[in-house]
Image: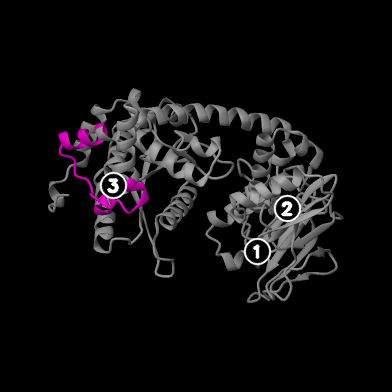
């Protein structure tokens, strides 16, 4: 890396690398995704290493053709003291010279010392949060073909199925949050590095990449070369082919599972046990994983716990119960359902209450939630349509004045579609988008109908399906008064 920043000319280097890698050389699936009409801003994850530097250069060189706006994200793990700070400065300088917005994150003092796993988790949390905040439709990573076998070998020893071995995917779409794209996945690491060297493009060299006591490096420098030598063929190319086949088969199985278990994929609270028991085990496993994910419970489940749940579902037992984080999975002869535990002795827990026009609900944090019926007039309607109503404290709903409303605390798996949103997603993700602290989330009331449909959470717009329209004559007004206001 050059010491003289004024001599850096990243736009020139990016154009040269763009000529080395034409658009047609990038993974075709990522090009299809990037060329979609709704794709605008994308977050490019850049560590400063050769793969991510080449990625940013290529995307910058072809950005006009792809009609995308590049935002550069870098996470400083503070793993290598001063060197980590230098990497962050390098990427920031590169982004600035290319005219790209730069977003930097840094591990705080209260977060645990880095291991490979914790570093990956922290970096991913940072990237996903920033992608949401900046309305990025995807996060783009610099993974290339030689990364595939390394990841496969690490996952094989842990024990994974076809979905796990199909990673990393060129395009990985999630139920919520931005997609992950890897345009360089069909390019060799050596080709990428050679192109940077030939054009004198500076990069950040991470000395820890040579430490073979780190599993990933041991595989890269020792095991994989030996494997290729023993079998007398390029193991990385074969692994890339296997990854593609496994992805196709995994997609086929997911499609079959979605068709057969609609309730599991829609986040229903209960599932039919007979249907799960009679299906092939691979489909049942996929349905259970999707169901747990819909209720935000996958992090509470280890691989062995998932197999225990699967064994219990297909067994002859007529009653079974499993503890899963904040919930219990209850299995009866007819169904499998999720029951959330009521935490006793917690002063911050919001008790389930009915919200009526006669009585306000007083909350543990000292706030008060009330409802009233109002007649709509042109002045009030104009205020609502103009966005002048502060959703932190007030909401107007196009609902019958006598509808039954309930108030409770938020639960993992809650989904909500606020007014103006393109679709529903987990309430937890809406909290993250608006940077609502975890402690505050537990104190916010969730207002639902008797059918458990969420109609409002203070801090968010009211539900799309209860939007005020020109035809609304009478509406419900919900008011959230904090302790200070009261």
Q: Quadrant of residue 412?
A: bottom right
- The residue sitting at the top extreme is 24
Looking at the rendered structure, the secondary structure element under dot 3 is helix
Looking at the image, residue 100 sits to the left or right of residue 468; the answer is: left
| Residue 238 x %, y % | 39, 27
Q: Kindly identify the residue that appears in the image at 35 percent across and 29 percent down.
A: 231
Q: Which residue is depicted at the point 36% across and 33% down? A: 145
In the rendered structure, which segment of residues is drawn in magenta?
A: 191-218
Position of residue 165 measured from the top left corner of the image (x, y, whole percent)? 49, 37
Say which mark, if any, is on residue 95. Answer: 3
Image quadrant holding the C terminus, namely bottom right
Residue 54: horizontal and vertical position, in percent? 28, 38
Callout 2: helix, strand or loop? strand
Q: CA distance from mark 1 to mark 2?
A: 14 Å
Q: In front here: 384 or 155?
A: 155
Within the magenta stretch, is there residue 47?
no
The correct choice, above or below, for 417 with respect to 190 in the image is below
- Mark 1 nearby-residue class (10 Å; few <14, some 14–19, many ≥20): some
The secondary element bearing badge 1 is classed as loop
* Residue 418 visible somewhere in the drawing: no
In the rendered image, residue 482, in percent from the top left (x then y), is placed at 65, 72
Q: CA distance from mark 2 to mark 3?
A: 42 Å
Residue 364 falls in image quadrant: bottom right
Q: CA distance from mark 1 to mark 3?
A: 40 Å
> Which residue, given by chain and number where applicable, does mark 2 sit on?
455
Which residue matches tag 1?
Answer: 393
Q: Does residue 421 appear in this view?
A: yes
The residue at the point 22 percent across, 46 percent down is: 203
């Amino acid at each position: 890396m050059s010491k003289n920043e004024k001599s850096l000319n990243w736009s020139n280097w990016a154009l040269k690398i763009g000529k080395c890698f034409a658009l047609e050389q990038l993974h075709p699936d990522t090009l299809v995704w990037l060329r979609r009409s709704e794709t605008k801003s994308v977050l490019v994850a850049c560590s400063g290493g050769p793969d991510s530097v080449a990625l940013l250069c290529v995307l910058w060189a072809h950005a006009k053709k792809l009609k995308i706006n590049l935002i550069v994200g870098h996470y400083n793990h503070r793993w290598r003291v001063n060197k980590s700070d230098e990497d962050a400065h390098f990427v920031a300088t590169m982004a600035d010279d290319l005219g790209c917005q730069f977003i930097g994150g840094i591990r705080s003092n209260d977060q645990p010392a880095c291991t490979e796993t914790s570093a990956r988790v922290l970096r991913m949390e940072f990237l996903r949060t920033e992608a949401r905040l900046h309305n990025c439709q995807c996060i783009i990573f610099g993974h290339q073909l030689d990364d595939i076998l390394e990841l496969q070998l690490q996952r094989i020893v842990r024990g994974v199925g076809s979905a796990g071995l199909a990673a990393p995917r060129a395009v990985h779409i999630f139920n919520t949050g931005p997609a992950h794209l890897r345009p360089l996945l069909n390019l060799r690491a050596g080709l990428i590095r050679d192109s940077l060297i030939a054009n004198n493009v500076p990069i950040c060299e991470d000395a820890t990449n040579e430490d073979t006591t780190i599993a990933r490096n041991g595989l890269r420098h020792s095991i994989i070369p030996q494997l290729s030598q023993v079998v007398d063929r390029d193991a990385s190319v074969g692994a890339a082919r296997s990854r593609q086949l496994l992805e196709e088969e995994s997609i086929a199985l997911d499609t079959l599972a979605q068709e057969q278990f609609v309730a599991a994929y829609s986040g229903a609270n209960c599932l039919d046990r007979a249907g799960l028991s009679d299906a092939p085990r691979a489909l049942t496993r996929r349905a259970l994983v999707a169901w747990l994910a819909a209720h935000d419970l996958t992090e509470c489940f280890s691989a062995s716990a998932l197999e225990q749940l699967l064994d219990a579902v297909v067994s002859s037992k007529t009653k079974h119960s499993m503890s899963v984080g904040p919930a219990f999975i209850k299995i009866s002869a007819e169904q499998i359902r999720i029951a959330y535990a009521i935490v006793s002795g917690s002063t911050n827990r919001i008790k389930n209450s009915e919200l009526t026009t006669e009585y306000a609900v007083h909350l543990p944090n000292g706030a008060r939630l009330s409802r009233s019926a109002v007649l709509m007039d042109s002045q009030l309607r104009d205020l609502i349509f103009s966005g002048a109503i502060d959703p932190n404290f007030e909401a107007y709903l196009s609902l019958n004045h006598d509808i039954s409303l309930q108030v409770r605390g938020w639960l993992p798996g809650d989904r909500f579609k606020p007014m103006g949103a393109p679709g529903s997603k987990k309430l937890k993700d809406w909290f993250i988008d608006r940077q609502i602290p975890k402690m505050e989330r537990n104190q916010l009331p969730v207002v639902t109908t008797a059918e458990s449909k969420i109609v409002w959470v203070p801090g968010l717009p009211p539900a799309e399906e209860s939007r005020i329209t020109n035809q609304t004559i009478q509406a419900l007004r919900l008011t959230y008064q904090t302790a200070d206001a009261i």
